[in-house]
Amino acid sequence: MSGTLALIESPAQLLNLLEWVTGERRGTADPGRVRAAVLLPRDATTRRQLAAVTPFATAEGIRVSVHDIRRSPAVNDHAIRLWR
């Protein structure tokens, strides 16, 4: 199975993804094959904005997963070990 994975770090990037999926829908794109991995920033305002925009993406059929990779140094160490 192939698809598209979008790495999202801001509300603007998520909106750009929605615009791309909507534009591609006129062709052969399947929104169900698009996944968005939201990498939460530290900024609380941006987190709230992402939380507000995410339902629009899921309503369009985009699978969204949220990853809080910046919450602590221990999480980053664990993530680095997983990639080795």
Image (cartoon, rainbow, N blue to C red):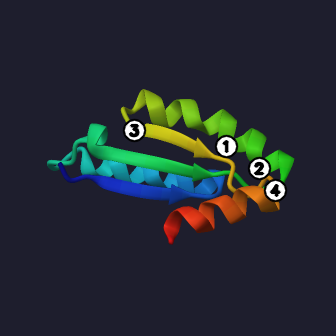
Mark 4 residue element: loop
Mark 3 residue element: loop
The disc, 3 or 1, on the residue closer to the chain's N-terminal end is: 1
Circles 2 and 3, Cβ within 8 Å, touching? The answer is no
The disc, 2 or 3, on the residue closer to the chain's N-terminal end is: 2
Residue 9 shows in this picture:
yes
Label 3 Cα crowd, 10 Å radius (few <14 / some 14-19 / many 20+)? many
Q: Identify the mark at residue 50; answer none if there is no mark.
A: 1
The disc, 2 or 4, on the residue closer to the chain's N-terminal end is: 2
Mark 1 residue element: helix
The disc, 4 or 3, on the residue closer to the chain's N-terminal end is: 3
Mark 2 residue element: helix
Q: Position of residue 10 (x, y in %)?
A: 65, 56
The disc, 4 or 1, on the residue closer to the chain's N-terminal end is: 1
Furthest residue in direction bottom, as rendered: 84
Q: Identify the mark at residue 46; answer none if there is no mark.
A: 2
| Residue hosting label 4 | 72
Residue 10 shown left or right of residue 57 in the figure: right
